[in-house]
Image (cartoon, rainbow, N blue to C red):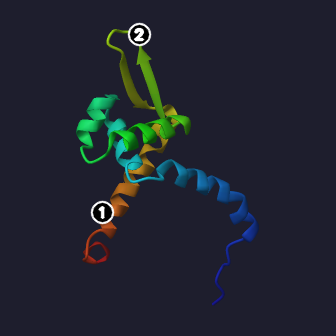
Amino acid sequence: MARNKPNDESYSSEQPLINRAIEILYGKWRLPIILLLGQKTLRYTELKDQLPSVSDRVLAKDLRALTTLGVVQRKVYAEVPPRVEYTLTERGRLALPIFIQLKEIGRIFSTSSDDHFN
């Protein structure tokens, strides 16, 4: 029986899209940040409280990167003291079901048993 070979042309034209998706999730804390913001809008300190193991430097860097990538929106309020909130953008919300599935895939592959396949 002949197997279908992937079309090299099709793969190479889709590779930049795949790379972009990987760029969004590159880093240990990006997926947890996205999943938390998928539940509700949070301030920096609230995110930090939910992710106590992440350093301030890494959290700030990942929030900045996710904002630049268009996944997270940073809203600054003109108040004293300043208030900053983070929320998912529309694009981030559209991709949220996929991010949730990635979490589930991680759960499946973190078990030592093959019970999921029986």
- The residue positioned 32% from the left and 44% from the top of the image is 55
Residue in the foreground of this view, choosing between 23 and 40: 23
- The residue positioned 29% from the left and 68% from the top of the image is 110
**Where residue 117 sits in the image (x, y, percent)?**
32, 75
**Where residue 12 sits in the image (x, y, percent)?**
72, 63
Q: Quadrant of residue 116?
A: bottom left
**Residue 18 against residue 24 in the figure, above or below:** below
Which amino acid type is marked by label 1? Arg
Q: Taking 86 as reference, is 23 left or right?
A: right
What number is the disc on residue 19? Answer: none
Q: Taking 69 as reference, is 104 left or right?
A: left
Looking at marks 2 and 1 on the same chain, the residue that comes earlier in the sequence is marked by 2
Residue in the foreground of this view, choosing between 29 and 56: 56
Q: Quadrant of residue 52?
A: top left
Which amino acid type is marked by label 2? Ala
Disc number lying in front (2 or 1):
2
Q: In which quarter of the image is the C terminus?
A: bottom left
- The residue positioned 48% from the left and 36% from the top of the image is 64
Tag 1 residue: 107
Q: Quadrant of the N terminus?
A: bottom right
Residue in the foreground of this view, choosing between 110 and 29: 29
**Residue 74 against residue 78 in the figure, above or below:** below
Cα–Cα span, label 2 and label 1: 41 Å
Residue reaching furthest to the right: 9
- The residue positioned 47% from the left and 51% from the top of the image is 25
**Residue at disc 1, secondary structure:** helix
Q: Taking 102 as reference, is 7 left or right?
A: right
Question: How many residues crowd mark 1 within 10 Å: few (<14), some (14–19), many (20+)?
Answer: few
Residue in the foreground of this view, choosing between 107 and 70: 70
What number is the disc on residue 78? Answer: 2
Residue reaching furthest to the bottom: 1
**Residue at disc 2, secondary structure:** loop
